[in-house]
């Protein structure tokens, strides 16, 4: 940005303007590049000179006078600046004023009056420039304030801000700003970043997030500024970290054909003890299948405590005190071995029940099947045997005739009653003693052409036991095999 002479410079320049300003043929514009300098550094300006006359002007700049209340001296510009300006022309001149050790010695911070002499056409113009020269004792940066935004104490689970106020005695410098949070035993946070500082007061905010496992304690925040690997400024502030609670819960279920294992864990990641609850709700049948349930407390891989727990009303509900850094794990193991045996137990029980309760064995078979003219004659045999150790009573054998049966008869030793309306034959046996067997046979005819495999209905046997309970047993279903033109 290009600047005209400052208000202060104009004030100092007023007497000279009375001499030169109104009649000056040249006009000047000054831009301050660097007006603050330490020993062995330079004050830098940019001067624009414009020829406002109608003739050429030869401009000569070779001397600067710099002084303050205490001292002053003339400084030659080497090599001297010479300009030839045609009417209306402008030239830009960069002016550097070296600052010597002698000039800055013993001075803390001093405002100088710097006079730049410009000669042309037997005239001399004097331009006043601002300058600040500092001794080596003055640091380039000062940490003026470090302020924690918010309360005086913080919780590591949340981020918090610090505001850092820096005073820069130089323009456009880029120090490394270090922030360190520590106590006597450990460093819990540190960061470094490059900041571009302008001349004067500089304020910036720093967001700090401490590690979750930060222990409650008093800490110190140190902010330092480095230039060329040298700490040039430093400031401190106090920080109080409060105790806090943070729990991490997890659940893992491992299940296969033979069983299930449930693992529920709670880790105390905070900095103070806390009561935690561990619970598991079992399924309806799981209490019968549990093989092991316990709670184990560990810290740094070592077992602190282990205890068996029980399922009460289908639940495990335990509350334990968990210290910082400790982990509590609830284990519940269930075996499906008993469930896998249930189908086999049911099958074996059913077979046993059948064996123990079945008292009658019924067998039905085709004795013969042949053609007689245009009809087919089928002879059927039925055997009923009491295989139990007790007598059975009111034995009734019911034979369902096939739909294609035309006539039935030809009974053996036991006659049957034919119910043509219902299509059945009833055989009344009465009582059968243990191991006693009755054999029944009969014939039926049909004029239906039977080919291939034709199944007959099963025979039904009804009887009563000694305690008058009715039992019903059915036989197998035999089949007729015929081919065209023969048996």
Image (cartoon, grey):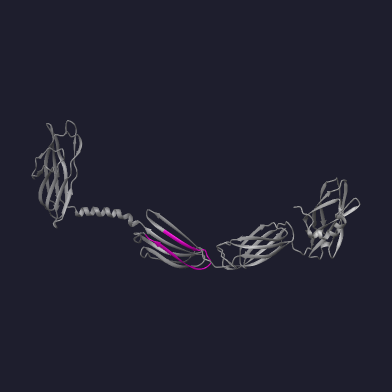
The quadrant of the rendering that contains the C terminus is top left
In the picture, measured across the screen, residue 451 lies left or right of residue 23, that is left
Residue 425 appears anywhere in the view:
yes
Q: Residue 67's x, y, as percent?
A: 84, 61
- Overall secondary structure of the magenta section: strand
In the figure, 387 relative to 276: above or below? above
In which quarter of the view is residue 9 placed?
bottom right
The question of residue 187 being in magenta is answered with: no
- The residue shown at (65%, 58%) is 192
In the figure, 254 relative to 278: above or below? above
Q: Residue 263's x, y, as percent?
A: 43, 60
The total of numbered circles placed on residues is 0
Name of the residue lying farthest toward the top: 485
Over which residues does the magenta segment extend? 262-282
In the picture, measured across the screen, residue 392 lies left or right of residue 176, that is left
Give the camera-side residue of 90 and 327.
Answer: 90
């Amino acid at each position: 940005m290009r600047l005209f002479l400052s208000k202060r410079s104009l004030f100092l320049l007023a007497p000279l303007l009375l001499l030169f300003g109104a009649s000056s043929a040249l006009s000047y514009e000054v831009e301050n590049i660097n007006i603050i300098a330490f020993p062995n550094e330079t004050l830098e300006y940019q001067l624009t000179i414009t020829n406002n006359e109608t003739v050429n002007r030869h401009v000569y700049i070779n001397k600067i006078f710099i002084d303050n209340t205490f001292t002053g001296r003339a400084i030659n510009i080497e090599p001297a600046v010479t300009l030839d300006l045609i009417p209306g022309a402008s030239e830009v001149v960069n002016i550097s004023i070296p600052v010597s050790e002698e000039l800055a010695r013993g001075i803390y911070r001093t405002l100088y009056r710097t006079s730049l002499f410009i000669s042309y056409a037997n005239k001399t113009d004097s331009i006043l420039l601002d300058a600040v020269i500092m001794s080596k004792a003055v640091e380039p940066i000062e940490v003026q304030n470090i302020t924690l935004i918010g309360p005086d104490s913080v919780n590591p689970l949340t981020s918090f801000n610090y505001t850092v106020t820096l005073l820069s005695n130089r323009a456009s410098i880029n120090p490394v700003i270090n922030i360190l949070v520590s106590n006597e035993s450990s460093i819990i946070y540190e960061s470094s970043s490059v900041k571009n500082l302008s001349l004067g007061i500089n304020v910036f905010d720093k967001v700090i997030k401490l590690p979750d496992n930060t222990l409650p304690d008093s800490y110190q925040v140190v902010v330092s500024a480095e230039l060329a690997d040298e700490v040039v400024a430093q400031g401190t502030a106090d920080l109080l970290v409060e105790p806090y609670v943070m729990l991490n819960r997890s659940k893992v279920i491992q299940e296969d054909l033979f069983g299930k294992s449930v693992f529920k864990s709670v880790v105390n990641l905070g900095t103070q003890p806390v009561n935690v609850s561990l619970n598991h709700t079992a399924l309806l049948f799981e209490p019968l299948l549990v093989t092991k349930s316990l709670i184990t407390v560990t810290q740094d891989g070592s077992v602190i405590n282990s205890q068996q727990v029980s399922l009460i009303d289908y639940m495990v509900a335990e509350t334990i005190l968990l210290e910082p850094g400790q982990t509590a794990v609830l284990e519940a193991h269930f075996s499906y071995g008993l469930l896998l045996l249930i189908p086999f137990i049911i099958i074996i029980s059913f077979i046993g029940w059948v064996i123990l309760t079945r008292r009658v064995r019924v067998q039905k078979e085709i004795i013969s099947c042949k053609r007689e003219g245009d009809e087919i004659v089928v002879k059927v045999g039925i055997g009923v045997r009491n295989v139990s150790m007790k007598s059975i009573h009111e034995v009734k054998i019911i034979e369902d005739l096939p739909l294609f049966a035309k006539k039935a008869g030809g009974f053996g030793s036991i006659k049957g009653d034919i119910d043509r309306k219902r299509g059945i034959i009833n055989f009344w046996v009465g009582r059968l003693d243990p191991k006693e067997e009755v054999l029944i046979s009969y014939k039926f005819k049909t004029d239906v052409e039977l080919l291939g495999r034709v199944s007959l209905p099963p025979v039904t046997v009804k009887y009563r036991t000694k305690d008058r309970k009715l039992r019903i047993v059915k036989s197998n279903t035999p089949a007729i095999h015929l081919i065209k033109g023969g048996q």
